[in-house]
Image (spheres, rainbow, N blue to C red):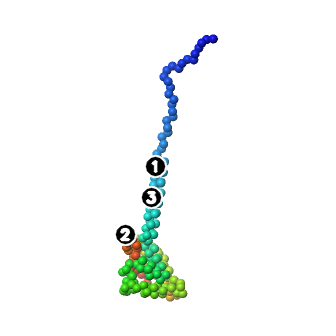
Amino acid sequence: MSDETAPEASGPAVAEVLPTPKKRRLWPFIVGGAVVLAAILTGLVVGVVTLLGVVGGSPAKTVTDYDLSFQKSDCDLFTSTTTKQFQNDFFGGAFDCEAFEENAGTLTIDGVYTYDVSVVISSTKGDTAEVVTTETDNSTGDPVDFTLRYHLVNEGGRWLIEAIDNETPE
């Protein structure tokens, strides 16, 4: 038998080659981040608008609350939806809750409110607003239709009625 040994490898040693890691694409992270940011901003905007709607109200809500003050003969609601000047002008002198309640009572027959109000359009420009309504007075038995334009001002974060124009065509 011959004494042979395995030949030894000659030459430089071969290093183990590891696969290079794949580069991650950044665009999915950028798009995902933009979507999350947009969702957060949308939530903030909706929250602020909702808060302002609850705190400051809207011109249209002020007008419907004004109508509700007559429906309920609620002097406090009337005064919270109108300017002091409007309140005094409405009765031709110093405002009086008793006179308001008496006037509001004429719009109720046998406990049924006989006046209907529908907001047609509402627009704001800075601290002023206009709300146009169609209204029907049924207190006499014969319906009478009106088109009214409410002029509002924002005082202390609240919309208040300062004047009303009757725009009913004759």
Sort mark 3 into few (<14), some (14-19) or many (20+) by Cα contacts within 10 Å: few
Q: CA distance from mark 2 to mark 1?
A: 38 Å
Pick the quarter of the image with the C terminus. bottom left
Which residue is at a point 57% across and 17% down the rendered structure image? Answer: 6
Q: Position of residue 95 (x, y in %)?
A: 39, 84
Q: Position of residue 65 (x, y in %)?
A: 46, 77
Pick the quarter of the image with the N terminus. top right
Q: Nearer the viewer, mark 3 or mark 2?
A: 3
Q: Amino acid at mark 1?
A: Ile
Q: Amino acid at mark 2?
A: Gly
Q: CA distance from mark 1 to mark 3?
A: 16 Å
Residues at discs 3 and 2 in contact (Cβ within 8 Å): no
Secondary structure of residue under mark 2: loop
The disc, 2 or 1, on the residue closer to the chain's N-terminal end is 1
Q: CA distance from mark 3 to mark 2?
A: 24 Å
Residue that badge 1 annotates: 30
43 above or below 154? above
Q: Position of residue 117 (x, y in %)?
A: 48, 78
Sort mark 2 into few (<14), some (14-19) or many (20+) by Cα contacts within 10 Å: few
Residue that badge 2 annotates: 126
159 above or below 96? above
**Residue 113 visible:** yes
**Residue 103 visible:** no
Which residue is at a point 44% across and 82% down the rendered structure image? Answer: 75
Which of the two residues, 7 or 117, is positioned nearer the viewer here? 7
The disc, 1 or 3, on the residue closer to the chain's N-terminal end is 1
The disc, 3 or 2, on the residue closer to the chain's N-terminal end is 3
